[in-house]
Image: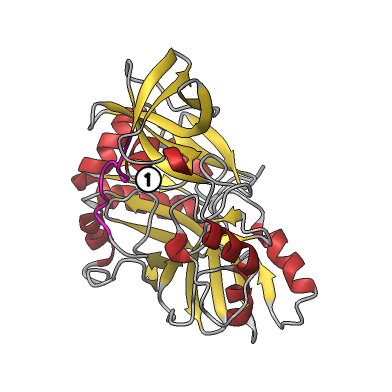
């Protein structure tokens, strides 16, 4: 396991627990999950997400190679833009759902969720006949998220990023610390990601941001399970993996079957689209006492005594005062208002399908 450039800083700022993500330590608690949620939606939090490793793909054929990896049409993406993309295998299964950063016409980053896409990309490249270089750059992101994040950014950079549009990025320099700053984040709140380009300056950057954010209520934090389920954000390995496809996950908008360019999984995804997916992701409100923590295993979902799916992510939302969940259920039972029973650690509970997201985001696009 590797430590991030911000590991020492998070220890000094009171991290309580880590999980493992992309073979790295990822801070998962600074205390109360509910306090972290309210800090995020009312003020701002700073999260070490360096475990979201970057895969850099460069070279004369970089654009063509990246398009082969994803079903999303990238033909109109310009340098300085970011896009949410899917990486699919030959059967249409989801291998990763990274953010794509276009740094130049011949240079891209894939900012990864939890799977070894650099190894996959290197394997695809071997016999592709394309001239590409694939490696992990010295780039480690922090997430500054929450409604007061713009005020913190002004403390740091003045008005330099007031005009940065959602899902765009540009280079920056903070006290001689080299960065790429993007208007992105895994929170559905207004926010930024600051990619450190010199791993030796991790503690300097973290402490500098915390000092700038003190007048605005900035707290050290971690990605909020509550907020991401409210916003129906996928967590790879929990809600999606190689056994799921984009149409099951309501992500058909990210698949362009009409573009002339071929991509891995195009034939399989064409068949799935024509037939229709067997399952659908839905939102559930689950009855019963408030869940004290999120689920750590899949919970069976039943209709009239027969299992019809599984809960993939569940949590209690203090804002909604409800137990909320993401689930995969058979397509013909996925309609809004459908009623189920869910096996939970507190026993079987009634559940109802509701519209996603539970709480809309403060950002649009991507």
Q: Is residue 168 above or below residue 187?
A: below
**Closer-to-camera residue (147/10):** 147
Magenta span covers which residues? 353-363
Q: Nearer the viewer, residue 60 or 210?
A: 60
Q: Residue at x 49, y 39 (%)?
A: 328
Extreme residue toward the right, this view: 127
Kindly identify which residue carries mark 1. Answer: 232
Looking at the image, which is closer to me, 90 or 18?
90
| Image quadrant occupied by the C terminus | bottom left
Q: Quick check: 267 above or below 152?
A: below
- Residue 360: within the magenta? yes
Q: Position of residue 107 (x, y in %)?
A: 56, 78
* Looking at the image, residue 14 lies above or below residue 246: above
Q: Is residue 7 left or right of residue 209?
A: right
Dot 1 falls on a residue whose secondary structure is loop
Q: Is residue 178 visible?
A: no
The residue drawn where x is 20% and y is 56% is: 151
């Amino acid at each position: 396991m590797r430590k991030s450039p911000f590991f020492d800083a998070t220890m000094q700022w009171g991290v309580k627990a880590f999980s493992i993500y992309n073979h790295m330590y990822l801070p998962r608690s600074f205390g109360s999950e509910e306090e972290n949620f309210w800090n995020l939606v009312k003020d701002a939090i700073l999260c070490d997400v360096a475990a979201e490793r970057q895969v850099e793909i460069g070279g004369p054929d970089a654009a063509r190679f990246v398009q082969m990896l994803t079903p999303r049409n990238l033909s109109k993406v310009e340098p300085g833009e970011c896009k949410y993309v899917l990486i699919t295998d030959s059967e249409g299964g989801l291998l990763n759902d990274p953010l794509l950063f276009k740094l130049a016409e011949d240079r891209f980053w894939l900012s990864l969720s939890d799977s070894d896409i650099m190894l996959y990309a290197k394997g695809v490249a071997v016999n592709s006949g394309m001239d590409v270089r694939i490696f992990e750059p010295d780039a480690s992101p922090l997430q500054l998220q929450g409604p007061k994040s713009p005020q913190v950014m002004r403390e740091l950079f003045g008005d330099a990023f007031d005009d940065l549009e959602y899902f765009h990025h540009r280079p920056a320099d903070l006290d001689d610390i080299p960065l790429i700053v993007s208007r992105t984040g895994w929170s559905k709140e207004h926010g930024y990601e600051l990619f450190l380009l010199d791993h030796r300056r991790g503690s300097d950057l973290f402490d500098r941001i915390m000092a700038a954010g003190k007048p605005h209520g900035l707290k050290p934090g971690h990605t909020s399970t509550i907020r991401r389920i409210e916003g129906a954000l996928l967590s790879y390995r929990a809600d999606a993996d190689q056994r799921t496809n984009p149409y099951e996950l309501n992500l058909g908008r990210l698949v362009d079957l009409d573009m002339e360019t071929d991509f891995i999984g195009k034939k399989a995804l064409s068949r799935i689209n024509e037939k229709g997916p067997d399952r659908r992701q839905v939102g559930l409100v689950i009855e019963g006492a408030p869940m004290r923590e999120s689920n750590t295993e899949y919970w069976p979902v039943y209709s009239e005594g027969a299992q019809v799916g599984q809960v993939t992510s569940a949590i209690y939302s203090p804002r909604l005062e409800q137990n909320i969940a993401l689930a995969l259920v058979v397509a013909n039972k996925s309609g809004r208002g459908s009623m189920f029973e869910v096996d939970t650690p507190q026993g079987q509970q009634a559940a109802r399908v509701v519209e996603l997201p539970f709480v809309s985001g403060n950002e649009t696009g991507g």
